[in-house]
Image (spheres, grey):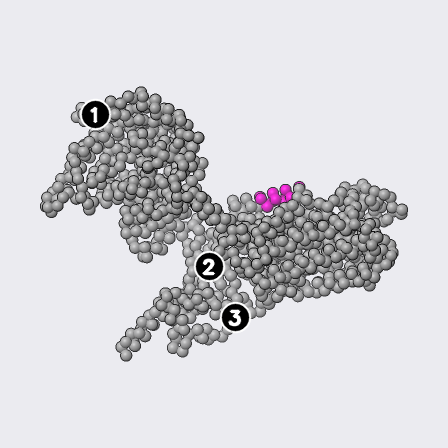
Amino acid sequence: MADENNGVEIEAAEDNEFAAGRGLGGRQYRPVFAHDNDRAVLEMASIDPIARASSSASLTDSNDLKVKVASGGKDGSLSNHRDVNGSHPESKLELFGFDSLVNILGLKSMASDQLQAPSSPRDGEDAPIHVERPKGNNVKLGTVMGVFVPCLQNILGIIYYIRFSWIVGMAGIGQSLLLVAFCGSCTFLTTISLSAIATNGAMKGGGPYYLIGRALGPEVGVSIGLCFFLGNAVAGALYVLGAVETFLNALPAAGIFRDTQTFMIVNGTNVAQPVAVTSPNLHDLQVYGVVVTIILCFIVFGGVKIINRVAPAFLVPVVFSLFCIFIGIFLARKDYPADGITGLSLKSFRDNWGSAYQITNNAGVPDPNGKIYWDFNALVGLFFPAVTGIMAGSNRSASLKDTQRSIPVGTLAATVSTSVLYLITVLFFGALATRDKLLTDRLLTATVAWPIPAITYLGIILSTLGAALQSLTGAPRLLAAIANDDILPVLNYFKVADGNEPHAATLFTAFICIGCVIIGNLDLITPTVTMFYLLCYGGVNLSCFLLDLLDAPSWRPRWKFHHWSLSLFGAVICIVIMFLISWAFTVISLALATLIYYYVSIKGKAGDWGDGFKSAYFQLALRSLRSLGASQVHPKNWYPIPLIFCRPWGKLPENVPCHPKLADFANCMKKKGRGMSIFVSILDGDYQECAEDAKVACRALSTYIEYKRCEGVAEIVVAPSMSDGFRGIVQTMGLGNLKPNIVVMRYPEIWRRENLTEIPATFVGIINDCIVANKAVVIVKGLDEWPNEYQRQYGTIDLYWIVRDGGLMLLLSQLLLTKESFESCKIQVFCIAEEDSDAEELKADVKKFLYDLRMQAEVIVVSMKSWDPQAEQQQDESVEAFSSAQERIGAYLGEMKDKARKEGAPLMADGKQVVVNEQQVEKFLYTTLKLNSTILRYSRMAAVVLVSLPPPPLNHPAYFYMEYMDLLVENVPRLLIVRGYRRDVVTLFT
């Protein structure tokens, strides 16, 4: 019994331990905040909705953890997830330390009700992201009513009814077939690309904007999305004008102003009897158009439910009118039902095969005194709106039962069926009437319709009004979707909560539509619509091209009939059509999209939507890394990759992850900002315990790098000690030839002042690790005084070139000159020579070497004579520091000897055996003192001094080396101590 009780206790403890991580309604996103400029991080947290009373109360009071569950169920509807005894059915899986997949992924609830996908994270997003179930009263649409019918209603519009017969008369049958095939191929290929992207995952509101933005990034998505919004708004005006023009042609007496009559000449020859062609007055179009637009806006304000109820009613007259038109075509005879009608005649077919491009007035009526000359390019711009509307189904993705099936099938069916309809209509219209009739009868479809033209007039008016209603419904929702993504603050006025109507966006769309209606010219509006639609279609094709070409692991569309070459060809066709229509409109539209792109880049909030460009950058980086190989980089291609060691020698103020001037110095090591810096810090402790602290520190360090505008990355390493952490960093950091090649750190000036006795061993260990790992070392002394980009320096950059370092010191001085802070300085190279060397010969050799390296510098040779310290120390400013160093070294050595004598062991320092040659120690002190004196004598006014770093002597106490270094840097305000590595970084050859 005791064992059984223990087992029960253990199982209960496990249940309590994992209860907080188990959720029945799916995962919950919880934002984790670091700093103001920090990238928002989404952290997954599972919440058990059936927690104990205490935990339920705490979760209820919490502000950042909320779960919304559908309230339609009973109070005890969740009890079936536990058995009678209250234990979890999935308790066996707790052995793995994770929740059941069913609970984590929410598969139980998804089996009965599909969950909405959470929105993508954006920087600065403070509100928690909720996962909600759709309400039970939401009606889900299938392929026919959800995609095929809206697409068909948007594609079949005004152009087909009142412009198509005129296009056939102007272009002829042959070029009309080419025109339909050309424009249809553009939308067909775009449909293929749309199907591939739409079936690669769940879709939210925004239609093509959502697809393009998630594929090409928020900047491209917003720029193309706003242009597509303008295209939809202008298209609404196009449909309204078409409906009004049809109404006025059907009932001329309804015109408020007097109709105008135009006498024309067809094909450059006088007609036997001039034909009077009536065209609605421009003012009538404006007045009726504004009134109709206002009425439609009131309907849109009523909500999308009303629009969805009346949408099928708009389609029925369209289908019926098409039926009447084709019946009338088959019943037509010569001069019946009107003059110029020949019936389906082979003679008319042959006569109308060729083109008859000519000059017309603004109303499209042939007129030798007109201002518009029509050719194939102009007809492309006029006809292309007749094939648009393929995005109507994707705009309704939130209302579809199965988006990944309905969108490709429904859109492709609508595209193919309308293209076939257009091709057949071209053949019938070409054989139905004379060219004069095709060009003069703007409503030939109504003329031949059976039994009376009024049916076709009604169908035209209802179809165009329905399309206008769809445009005025879709455009505001597109604008609201862009605003809700919170990319552009200027669009915050158009934000709407989920389930609410975008009234502000609807008003804005209405103003745009009314403005275009006041223009009143249908043929001038259509090219504008065409450009915006082509931009959107090109964006969809480019998105699919990029995603298909990169073929990331996440690219797994259910629609298999696609290829990157088809998408690329579709994008090229879109661009070609734009320039064929009008290069001026093309330049204007591209300039508008570019301006929006740069505005979003500057003013917009950055977001990471996992777009294709990020995948392209990743693959490009991988290919570049492989092409670099593992062999050494040639000196001509050598770039400094500094490893900035941010771990301070001491303490920094709170919330300061790094010394403020380290990034300024890192920028000085790059030519025109090219290169990458790796900022590294070390946290002492156990990794499992300090992992979260390391993430917080990494975010803070990344924020610092971004604030300092330094191209670099941040890394935080958790290790038992600084030495262990740095040893791991110097061995493993980087990949291939992109490993850091220079270690940059601050000189520990505070170690003696704050009695930090552990610093000498750590400092020497880091230098030795760099030497073993073949890394160059740059130690900055006087970092507090290092200038920023706005502090201009004057004077000289002095190099004390003592040992061969591969030219690193020379290269660093040249990089400093490329910065505005040091561009006014001159370089001086001090060569330290032995007493018996030929100074002039050495100077000549160095000058020749610098000339071959294309470096301008003044060369100064300084002889390091064997000197008697007793004779010169009275004149040396550093004698006090020298004497103090001697005393401290003597005292430290005495303590080592006393300890060794007491323990009967050899001399030990820093946990290892050392060998101390007192004469050698004194020699090192004298050498560093002499070098320090030389620096103070020649470089007191230098902007910065560079000197070679002496390596730590083997089997030497680290404390002694720190004394040497302190004596070397004494009274030098700004000093770079440089040690190269076993390779050249400069070359003499081109």
Depth check, mark 1 against mark 2: the one in front is 1
Q: Type of residue at label 2?
A: Pro
Q: Main secondary structure of the magenta part?
A: helix
Looking at marks 3 and 1 on the same chain, the residue that comes earlier in the sequence is marked by 3
Instruction: Farthest residue to the top: give it.
Output: 840
Percent x, y of residue 347 = 84, 52
Q: Type of residue at label 1?
A: Ser
Q: Are marks 1 and 2 in contact (CB under 8 Å)?
A: no
The residue indicated by pointer 1 is 866
Q: Is residue 417 left or right of residue 432?
A: left
Residue at x 63% of width, y 61% of height: 410
The kind of secondary structure element at disc 1 is loop
Q: Are marks 2 and 3 in contact (CB under 8 Å)?
A: no
Please state the extent of the stretch shown in magenta in the rendering: 584-595
The residue indicated by pointer 3 is 112
Q: Give the tally of numbered discs.
A: 3
Looking at marks 2 and 3 on the same chain, the residue that comes earlier in the sequence is marked by 3
Bin the neighbour count of mark 3 within 10 Å (Cα to Cα): few under 14, some 14-19, many 20 and up: few
Percent x, y of residue 897 = 13, 41
Percent x, y of residue 387 = 68, 54
The residue indicated by pointer 2 is 128
Q: CA distance from mark 3 to mark 1?
A: 92 Å
Image vertical order of residue 399 relative to residue 837, above or below: below
Residue at x 42% of width, y 34% of height: 636
Looking at marks 1 and 2 on the same chain, the residue that comes earlier in the sequence is marked by 2
